[in-house]
Amino acid sequence: MYSYYSYIINTIFFTTFFAPAVPLGLVFSIIGLSMTYCITKYIFLRRLCIPKKLGLKLSIETTKLMEFIPLIYGISNYCFDNIANKNNKNVTKFIIIFGILYVSLPIDYIN
C-alpha cells in the first residue's frame, strides 16, 4: 500500500514537470491513475480480507507534497520556454513566484 502513495506522487510530479512540453501526457496520467484506483479497489474488495491500516501521518505527508506542484510547474514551464522560445515570459515568472510563495507561506493557518 505504501508503494501506491509513492507511485501516485511520482506520477503527479512527473506529469506536472512535463505538462508544458507534452500536454497530452495529462490525459495519459489521468487514465493511468484512474486505472490504478480501479485495480486497487478491486484488490481490496475482492482479494484481501482486511486491508492494512496505514495511519494518518502518511496521508498528511502526501498532501503536503502536493503543495510543491505549482512550483514544479513554474520551473518546468520556465525551462521549456527557454528551450523553445529563448525568452522568458512574465506569466512564467509569475507562476514561479506564486509557487515559491505557496510553498513558503503557512497554508495550514490560512485555510
Image (cartoon, rainbow, N blue to C red):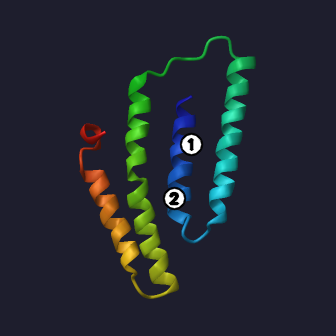
Residue nearest the viewer, comparing 67 with 107: 107
Q: Which mark is residue 15?
A: none
Residue visible at 40% across and 81% down in the picture: 89
9 vs 95: above or below: above
- In which quadrant of the rendered image does the C terminus lie? top left
Question: Is 58 left, or right, of 10 in this rendering?
Answer: left
Residue visible at 45% across and 62% down in the picture: 73
Q: Earlier in the sequence, mark 1 or mark 2?
A: 1
48 vs 91: above or below: above
Q: Position of residue 71 (x, y in %)?
A: 38, 60
79 vs 87: above or below: above
- Residue type at the position of mark 1: Tyr
Residue visible at 62% across and 58% down in the picture: 26
Q: Which residue is mark 2?
A: 16
Circle 2 packing at 10 Å, graded few (<14), some (14-19), many (20+), is many
Farthest-out residue, top: 49
The secondary element bearing badge 2 is classed as helix
Q: Position of residue 46 (x, y in %)?
A: 75, 18
Residue visible at 71% across and 33% down in the picture: 38
* Location of residue 74 (image quadrant): bottom left
Q: Nearer the viewer, mark 1 or mark 2?
A: 2
Question: Is 2 left, or right, of 60 in this rendering?
Answer: right
CB within 8 Å, label 1 to label 2? no
The secondary element bearing badge 1 is classed as helix
Farthest-out residue, front: 111
- Residue type at the position of mark 2: Thr
Q: Which residue is mark 1?
A: 7
- In which quadrant of the rendered image does the N terminus lie? top right
Q: Position of residue 97 (x, y in %)?
A: 30, 65
Q: CA distance from mark 1 to mark 2?
A: 14 Å
30 vs 111: above or below: below
